[in-house]
Amino acid sequence: MLREWEENAKQYRIRLKEEIEQDFFSNVNKESSHTYNGTPCWEWTENLTKAGCGTYGGMVAYRFLWTQILGREQPKGMELHHRCEFRPCVNPWHLELLTRKEHRASP
């Protein structure tokens, strides 16, 4: 009985993650005219902050993608930096972790 419950819970988590990913990416334009190193920015198309960043799930969209969808860590004291310098971008290949000092010094 416990094993069956664990399997059902696992399947539910998988479906929930898939639904969240579908919902998240329904707000992304992967064919943006903005590019970085020849690759397009994935432009967030909904709910932008005054600073121009997308929001999703109570956090900025690029951080939601990094931590919740990709499952990557954002260590304490580190900040996500847009190498493309386009704040609505959620393309993970355009993001990098920098220290706060490095981030403030970047263009």
Image (spheres, helix red, strand yellow):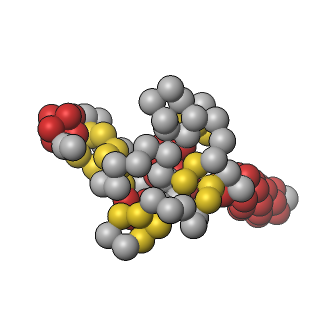
Q: As displayed, is residue 12 above or below residue 99?
A: below
33 and 58: which one is in front?
33
- Residue shown at the point (36%, 64%) measured from the top left: 36
Residue at image coords 30%, 40%? 79
Above or below residue 97? Residue 51 is above
Q: Is residue 22 above or below residue 97?
A: below
Residue drawn at the location 64% of the way across and 35% of the way down: 47
* Residue 95, quarter of the rendered image: bottom left
The part of the image, by quadrant, that contains residue 104 is top left
Which is nearer the eye, 46 or 25?
46
Instruction: List x then y, in percent, for residue 105.
Output: 15, 38
36 displayed left or right of 89: left
Q: Nearer the viewer, residue 45 or 24?
A: 45
Residue drawn at (27%, 40%) of the image: 78
Image height check: is 68 above or below 79? below
The C terminus, quarter of image: top left
Question: What x and y, as percent, mark residue 67?
Answer: 48, 48
In this view of the protein, can residue 10 be seen by the observer? no
Q: Position of residue 1 (x, y in %)?
A: 84, 59
Which residue is more in the foreground, 4 or 73? 73
Residue 90 is left or right of residue 9, and the answer is left
